[in-house]
Image (cartoon, helix red, strand yellow):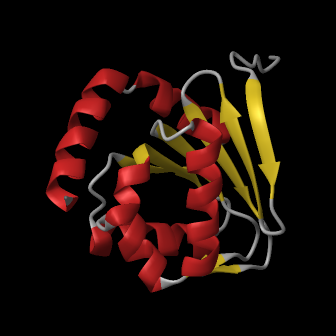
Amino acid sequence: MEKTVSYKVIDRVELSHTKVELRDDGITQFFYGDNFNYTMKETEELIDVTVKMTKGVVHKMLRIPGKFSTIDMEVMKYISRGKGTLYTLADSFVLFSMPQRILGNFYLRMNKPLVPTKLFNEVEEADKWLQSLDTEELRRLHKLRVAQFN
């Protein structure tokens, strides 16, 4: 069975550690590099790129980590419960290895993200889940988060 792509990539930025693509269906996808430890430095760089790319409009996020890449605890807190939640409507992570799955489950249990967040084994499953979410309801919840941080 052939995979069909129902979106068009309308903007793309390639950084030394991550490729970011803005899709015309309201999803921003991140292809993270291999063998890299993501810190607040890279996170802030990605947020700057994403905000410019989306012109400040928040989107659903499809995140695809690279092989053997990790993320600092500070970044986990920032994107799950901190001001990092102001840049996303929902988060999906596609995890390919057992260490990533362990880290992902730790992230969900310990950080309890404020935005809808799920872990997946396949890109298609993550994409389908993001598409199923009510964007208007997510935007309403986003406005409440913005008020909470102001």
Residue 17, percent from left and from top: 78, 68
Task: From this view, report whether residue 149 is shown above or below residue 88.
Answer: below
Residue 68, percent from left and from top: 73, 76
Residue 82, percent from left and from top: 31, 68
Is there any visible trace of residue 121 in the rendered image? no
Task: From this view, report whether residue 148 is shown above or below residue 131.
Answer: below
Q: Give 54 or 121, whichever is nearer the viewer.
A: 54
Q: Residue at x 64, y 33 (%)?
A: 124
Task: From this view, report whether residue 5 is shown above or below residue 32.
Answer: above
Q: Residue at x 17, y 44 (%)?
A: 144
Quarter occupied by residue 89: top left
Task: From this view, report whether residue 70 is shown above or below residue 21.
Answer: below
Q: Give 138 or 93, whichever is nearer the viewer.
A: 138
Q: Residue at x 33, y 45 (%)?
A: 116
Q: Residue at x 36, y 56 (%)?
A: 85
Q: Is residue 59 left or right of residue 53?
A: left
Quarter occupied by residue 133: top left
Q: Give 122 or 55, whichever is nearer the viewer.
A: 55
